[in-house]
Every structure is written in structure tokens, then in C-alpha cells.
Amino acid sequence: MTTAPAAVSTALQLNDVRKVYTMGDGSQVVALDHATLTLGSDEMVALVGPSGSGKTTLCSIAGGILSATEGTIVVGGEDISNHNAKELTKFRQDRVGFVFQSVNLVPFLNARENLLVVDELGKRTGAPARARADQLLEELGLADRAKNLPSQLSGGQRQRVAIGRALMNDPALVLFDEPTSALDTKLGEQVMELIQGEMKSRGIAAIVVTHDERITHYCDRSVHIVDGRLEA
Amino acid sequence: MFLAFKEMARAKVRFALLIAAIALLVFLILFQQSLQNGLITGFIGAIREQNAPVLVYSVDGQRVLQGSVITPDMEADILAAPGTGETGPIGQGTFTGLPSGNADGETFDTTLIGYELGPDGDGIGAPTTVVEGRLPTADDEGVVSDADVALGYDIDDTVTLLPGGKEITIVGVAENAQLNVSPTLFVSYDTYLSAVKSVNPDAGTPLPNVLGVIPADGFTPDEAVASINEQSLELDALTKQDAATETPGVAQVQQSFNIIFLLYGLVVPCVTGLFFLIVTFQKANSLTLLRAIGAPAGRLVSSLLIQVVVIIGVGLLIGTLLYYPVSQQALGGIALQFETAAVIFWSVLLLSLGVLSSLVAARRVLKIDPIEATTGQGVGS
Amino acid sequence: MKLALKELRRRPGRFATATVILTLIAILLMFLGGLLDGLIASSTGAIRAQNADAIVYSDTAQASFVRSRIDPELRAQVEAVEGVTEVGGIGNVQLGARVPGNGPRDLASVALFGYELAPDGVPDAPPYGQAWADDSIKADGVEEGMIIEVGPARTPIAIIGFVADTNFNGQSSLWASPDTWRDTLSANRPDAQLGPDVFQALIVRGDGANLPDAIDAATGGATDSYSVDGAVAAIPGVTEQQGTFNQIIGVTVAIALVVIGLFFALLTVERTSLYGVLKALGAKSSTIFAGLVAQAVVVTAIAAFVAGTLVILLDLLLPPGSIPLLITPSRIILSVVLLLVAAVLGCSFSLRRVLRIDPASAIGTTS
């Protein structure tokens, strides 16, 4: 298994990032205001805030899904502040993993194929990717579910497939968007234990976006965000 | 109603594409309907519109005027049949004609149909649909079909036959009276004979192609036909309608078009049904929500049906509007008409089929359980 | 693209109805095309088969055999034209033929040709009273060696063999010596009989850039000459049929385009969130769109294949003579190509939507 590039010590560096939307009537909405955040290369951070606080915006910018209006963003040593859409696409293929709130597995692909999607869309390495997928499934306890479609998996199993997909391209950073919001307390704890275990054992940095204070203790620290502003 | 229209306004491209597909299909169906009718009328309109209830061909003619020849022996046989009342000879020939009304001096294949005029031009074989002018009452006068007027065959124009230069003056116009999709002139029998001679001096006097027969008193046309055919195996008597529909080629045209209409007609309800089924699946969540907040199921279904009727209705309208100008054209000698009956028929048929096809989607709508609004399942899963 | 094809394989149901509709449209295209080809072939076979550099009618004939006469003087003028190497007379008469074994009112339609220069695929003119027959006449029960009686005068013609694709005006052609033809003509159509050595038209072979024009110029306009293609086009109805049918075919292809566009536009709407996820994972818009086009092409190809099979089956099952259908590989291939082009173009309606899907939509459905 490959490790993250040793020379990079921070997984994420946001400096003075601002995101401003201009509405149809000319008014402006500031979704993110002067956000500065640094993540160590294997640090797990909980990003906590109420709905509309801007946590999704921050996550999106960190993940290269959204461009910032101002500020610098460096992920795994790569400065993506001024990347155009094409460069961001490539960046997302190679350096970032996502676990979405509504899981969002491809419904007509089985578990193994859902993991292989990333390789399909990007580098197309073929056999090495398949080997990695099989290994990840094994490590996530899904080896016997490899050929099942999402509709045939439980909620927790689907969550694990999504995590496996996020790990496929050996990312510098994994973004978890509300991973426990649809789960009951027990299942939520199980999922967070899994996430914590996987991230730590591989030494991968993670941001866990959540409004659920019950799970923040699984992370190294919490960062609160309200109305687009980060509080220490 | 409100929902139905709001949804269509929000998804303009999709609904526009559906309307476009239906409009094009409707246009093609109606256009081909006109084509079929125009083709058949152009082929045998003259036979249908002449006044003899029974026509007797020679069997060798294979129900084609120009191939048939009635010898004196055959004529005797026909006269001897109990079902035969009055008879009149009909001769047909195709000539190269130069109509004086044509500005470019073009020549056209021109069909002459010669019949014994009788006292007022209304002899056996005369056209029955004269709408302008009059029937011929002397030699070298002719009645032309309405489709030919545009080519230069109008009242008071003369048609010069080539070679030979024989001239015929047009005195009347009859509706739907073409033969073989070419300009057709009804003339006196003697005019026809002299035309044949003028073009080919080597020719002998031609025998009549067919005999027009008025059934004897007490005989229906079908009975007259049977009694004449009994006389001899050389005779092929037919009622006027049968003569028209059994002309070689007509049945083929009808069969071909029937297959075409069937296929096009199937495509419309399939496309409509598919569209509304998919759309229903896509808005599953909002439908479930509406049911949860108290919208009656019947309201949702009627909203769907309103959309179907509006879409097909607009498609029919646009298709018919596209069809109208095309239906006024002459297509290579075939005069097209705006077939109102066809428009009504297809409108009713396609609307019914469209509504039927959307019942599949309606069924899905009725199956929605409002409780699913809370669990987040919805129709689509 | 692999993803898109996987979806097709795993979820065939959702594409099934669209495939059915496209199959119907494909059948229509092939049927219309086959109808056109059949109509044209059976009207023009005899002319197309001619091995000629010019076909010469008389000037007022309007390219119609029946109204054309070439007498020996006119023929001599044509023979004298520079570049002309061979001249042969040709004429025909259309009659009903009585076939042994058929009912007394059940005649075969034939066009009897008298010829001097043999068309392609037809041997030299047989002895008096004999003729080669187009194999379409077999549908009327005619066999080699049979003697059929032609016309009201029951002129006997012995069929000594068969040739292919030489029909004229939708009737089966018979190919005989000029004398056989001329005698049959005068016996059965006395009003159209022609003197000895008079033909209806001439088949001319020669060199020279534009032989038809050269001949007409040399005869001072007494003749109306055509190349073989020109003579085919001059047969009444041919150009009109082609024009009309091609227009109908064109509109039908447009319908296919709209239907595909519609179906895939709907599909794209439904997959917006999936595409959002894929884009978040790093899929390029071009990859997603290429997958869409791949699906459209596969669906269309399947529809075309099924349609082709059904149409060929229909052609085999149709009783000969009922509908003038001619199914050729080139027509089927043309229909398939048109449909595939329509498929690719139809997808373009979805392009804008695919481009506009925002990967950010994948994150955070609530916040």
C-alpha cells in the first residue's frame, strides 16, 4: 500500500478564502468569509455548524468542486487556487476522496465496480486498480459483498462502499459530508469508528462535516463555523 | 390544471421536443393520406366519375383501358346478354399534347377518352363532375380534369396533338377526372378516332377499348355484370367502382400505404406513452409530496391527462398547419387536396391512442402512497 | 463510456421502450426505401439493362415507346452520325398472356420487346416465335419451354429461358426477335402496327463526348435522344416517385432524431444527480456526453438490426406481385447510417444540460 508523499506535512491549507455569490437582483451573498484553516497530513477535523453556515461551501472549495472568489487553497502540496475547470477535474480524480451525505453510489454498479469508477474516469490503470479495489473491500469487511448492487446492501454497508471509493485513488484528503445524519445512534457510532480507524491507520487527513455534536469526539479537533466565518 | 401548465412551462425543451415529434408525425400521416388519395384519383378518377354503371373490358385487357379491345363478336355477345340495356363505345389513347395555355410551350402525355356524345354531350361514358363550362357537343371539343388546368389546359385553350397537329378545344372542366395521372380529355368518339389516325397514319380504325353499359330495366349493375360475363369467357364486365379499384396498381398503392399508416400510427402513442411514463417517474417525489399534503389522486391523474390532451392537441394543430400549404400543391401531376375527413379521423384516433397510452403512467400515479413522503421512498425507487 | 454501456446491460428495461419506437421508425425507413426501390426497379429494368451510349426516340414521343417511331430514313441519319459504331432497333408491346394451367381470366402482364442489340444479361435475339423472359414471370406459373399465348390474338411465344431485372412499367419483359415483336404487334394492336423496318426506338453505341446531343443535332431535332440514365429518368413517374419518397424518408429521419433527442433528454434529467456525483469524482463532461452518445448509438443499432431482420422477413413472406418491395443491402445500410447520424445529432439536445451539471450539486442536499 502506498503512503502519502512524505515531503508534504499539511494535507490542507486554506488562507483567507472568500466565496461570494451575486444574486439575480445584484445583491451579494457571502457564503464564506476569510476562512483560514490548516490540516496536518493525518489530521481528522470535525467541521461543525448549523444549516446554512457555509460548511458545505468550505468543503466544496477544499475538495476542488467549487472555485473560491478570493484566497489560496493548497491541498496535499498542490495549489488549486487558480485551477481552471479541467485542472480541478483532474485534481479531484487524483488527490481527493468524497463520501457524500446521500451516499450516491451508482445504482447499477455492484460494490466492486463502484470502487473502480474512479479509476475508470481517470487514469485507467486496469489491473492495479482492480487489485486495490479487492484489497480495500477486504479491509472494509465487504469481500463477500463485492458483487452486490447497492439495493442489495444495508445502509451501513453502502456507507462502507462509499468510503472504499473515496480511498481508491490514495487521496491526500477525504471529505465526509454528514456521514451519520441518516443513521441511528448505534449505527452512527459504528460508522464513525470505521472512519476513524481507516483514516488513522492509513494516515490520511479528513474533514467530517456535521451538525451532530455526538460524533465530534471521534475527530482530533472541532472547528465551528457560523454564517460563513470560522471560529477557533 | 394549474399544475399541469406550470410543469410544462418549466420544462419547455422536453415538452417542445415531444410536440415537435408528434407534429412531424401528424404532418407525414396527413401528407401521405393526401398522396394516397391523389394518386388513386389521378390513376382512375376518370373511370369513377364517368356515367356508365357497368364497363365491359376484354379479358386480355387485364382491367386496363388501353389494353382492352372489344371486337364486333364480343359486342354481339354483350348485346345478347339479358342484363344489357343501352351500350356505348369508349376509346382511350395516350398522345403527346401541346396545351396552348402553357406559357413555356411544354408538351405532356395527354389521355383522350372518346365516347358517343349523344344529343347533349351526356352520352354513355360522359364525365359526371363538370364544374365549369359544359360537356362537349361537337367533334374536337373536350372536357379536361381540374388537376390539369394549372398545366395550361383551361377552358378555351386548344390542345394540339403531336405529331399530326390535330387540335381540340377545351370547353369544360370536370373534378377528379384524370386517368393514369396524366392530363385527360373527354372527347367525342369520332374525335378520338381521328386523333389516332392523325398521329399514326399506318393505323387501321381502332376498335373500342371498352363498352359502357346501362343495365336493362330490373337489373342492378351487379346483376348486369354477372349476366354479361356468362356470355363469354372473353368478356370481363365490372361495375364502375370495381373497375376503378381493380385497376392494376391501385390495390398495391392502398396496401403499401396501409402498412405505412399502421407504422406511423403506432409510433405516436408509443412516444407519448413513453414520455409521460418517464416524466411521472421523474417527478415521483413531488407527486408524493402533493398527495401527502392532501391532493386527491384523481386530481393528479386529471392533471396528467390534461397534459396529454394539450400536447397531442397542439401537435395535431401544428402538424395540420404544416400540412395545409403542402396539400394545396400539385405533386408531379397529382393534385393534392386538403382531406378534412382524414384530419378529423386521425385527430380522434391519435388523441384516443395517446390518452390510452398515458394510462400506464396514470396507473403509476394512482399507486402513490402519501406515507412515502415521510420515509423518502417515492415512486422512483 | 464503459459506465454507460454497463448501464445499458444492467438496466435494459429503461431503454426498451425507446428501442421499440426506434425499431418502428427503422422499419418505416427501410420499408419506404424498399418500396421506392421496388417501384423504380420494376419500371426501369428494361432500360437500365441496355448497353447503350444513347437511346433514341422520335421527337414528339416524350420518351415513350408507344408514341415513338423511327423509320429507316431517320435510322440512316443516326447511323451516319460521327462516333456512332453500332445501331440497333428496339420496340415493345404490352399485352396480357395466357399461361397454360392458369384460369381463363387470369392473365400474366407482359411487355414483349423486339431487339437487335442485346441488353446486358440478355443473350442475342432468339429465333422467330421464341423469347427470353424476365424471371419475375415465374410468379405467374411460367416455366422454361412453356408456350404462352400473348394478346387477344393468342400469338404463341415459346419461353426458352430466363433473365433478371429487365422489367418495364411493372410488367414482366419478354425478349424476342424484331420480327416476332412486329408480327405480334400487328396481330394484337392493329391500330399501332408499324411498317417493316420501322422501330419505336434505337439503341446506339459509339464514342464521342455527348452522343445523345450529337445525334439530335445531326437529325435536326427529329429525334429525342437520351443517355441510359436520362432515359430512365424520363420514364413517367420515376423522378416524381423518387422526389416524393425521399422527402418522406427525410422527414422520417427527422422524426427519429427528435425521438432520440427527447428520450435522451429525459434520461439526462433523471441522471442529473448521478452525473453530479461522477463529475465530483473527476469525470469530464466529455466523458459523460460520450457515454450518452454511446448509449444512443447502441440502442439505435439494436433497433436497426431488429428492423432489418423484420423487413427482410416481410419481403420473403410477401406474395410476389402484391407490393412492389425490393430490399437491397445498400438500402438497409443507408437506412442504418441515417438512423445513426440522427442518433448522434439527437443527443445534442442533452449536451447543454450535461455541461451545466455542477459537481457541487453532489454535496450537501440539505445545507
Image (cartoon, coloured by chain):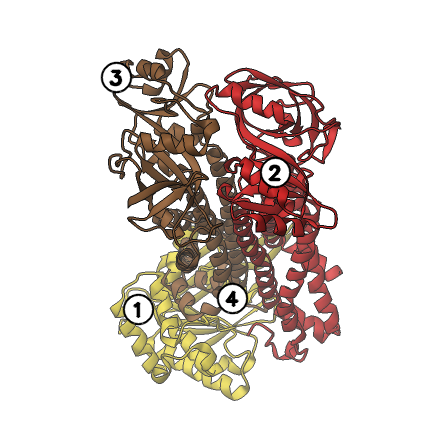
Q: Secondary structure at mark 1?
A: loop
Q: Position of residue A86 (x, y in %)?
A: 40, 52
Residue visible at 57% across and 75% down in the picture: A211
State which chain is coloured brown.
C
The amino acid at mark 2 is Leu
Q: Secondary structure at mark 2?
A: strand
- If you read the primary sequence from the N terminus, does the residue marked by circle 4 or circle 3 appear first? 3
Mark 2 lies on residue: B211
Q: Chain of mark 4?
A: C
Q: Are marks 1 and 3 on the same chain?
A: no
Q: Chain of mark 1?
A: A
State which chain is coloured red.
B
Mark 3 lies on residue: C83
Q: Secondary structure at mark 3?
A: loop
The amino acid at mark 4 is Ile
The amino acid at mark 1 is Ala
Of tags 4 and 1, the one toward the viewer is: 4
Q: Let me know if residue C353 appears in the view.
A: no
Of tags 1 and 3, the one toward the viewer is: 3
Disc 3 vs disc 2: Cβ atoms closer than 8 Å? no
Q: Residues within 10 Å of mark 2 (few under 14, many from 20)?
A: many
Of tags 4 and 3, the one toward the viewer is: 3
> Which of the 4 image quarters holds residue A184?
bottom right
Mark 1 lies on residue: A4
Q: Are marks 3 and 2 on the same chain?
A: no
Q: Position of residue A30 (x, y in %)?
A: 60, 57
The residues bearing labels 4 and 1 have C-alpha atoms spaced at a distance of 25 Å
The residues bearing labels 1 and 3 have C-alpha atoms spaced at a distance of 87 Å
The residues bearing labels 4 and 3 have C-alpha atoms spaced at a distance of 82 Å
